[in-house]
Amino acid sequence: MYAPPPMINLIVIRSADIEIAERFYSSLGLLFGKEKHGAGAEHYASCTDGFVFEIYPLKDGDHPTASVRLGFEVDTVDGYISDILKMGGVVIKSPHDSPWGRRAVIKDPDGHTIELVCKNGT
């Protein structure tokens, strides 16, 4: 008997400024709350359908998470570009049609690469 494959349910990124990062990812529609567990660092967390996305502060000696590539399925790719630029993001690859749908590649203010895709639309 085969078990279903594991599903990713948590991604944690590190940010030099969690307030800027929270505003950036909120502009994509994620809803965050501030959390602190025990003696751990205060951070932001967003939970959607059992998937948790957290933004923790980058401390001295921590390794940046910027080499990680994130992907979000959104309701519109083109519609987010102006907000991304206002929030300090950079467009790496402008919105275009691809075999996976309408797609763009951006970077957040910390340098994380993010792929936005809309399967049906703009």
Image: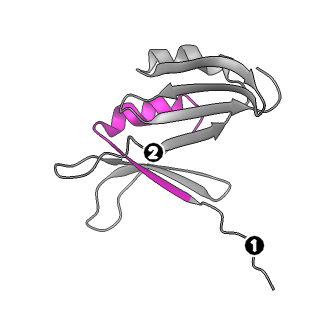
Q: What x and y, as percent, mark residue 108?
A: 43, 30
Task: State the quadrant of the C terminus.
Answer: top right
* Residue sticking out furthest to the front: 99
Drawn side of residue 4 relative to residue 52, left or right: right
Looking at numbered disc 2 in the image, what kind of residue is underneath it? Val
Count of numbered marks: 2
Residue 12 painted magenta: yes
* Residue sticking out furthest to the left: 60
Give the mark nearer the N terminus: 1 vs 2.
1
Looking at the picture, tell me which residue is in the foreground, 76 or 70.
70
Cα–Cα span, label 1 and label 2 = 25 Å
Drawn side of residue 29 relative to residue 117, left or right: left
Looking at the picture, tell me which residue is in the foreground, 81 or 36.
81
Q: What x and y, as percent, mark residue 111?
A: 38, 32
Looking at numbered disc 1 in the image, what kind of residue is underneath it? Pro
Q: What x and y, as percent, mark residue 12?
A: 44, 53
* Residue at 59%, 60% in the rendered image: 9
On residue 4, the disc is 1
* Residue at 60%, 60% in the rendered image: 8
Per the rendered image, the range of residues in magenta is 10-31
Q: Which residue is mark 2?
A: 68
Color theme of the render: one colour
Task: State the quadrant of the N terminus.
Answer: bottom right
Give the quarter of the image for residue 39.
Answer: bottom left
Q: Secondary structure at mark 2?
A: loop
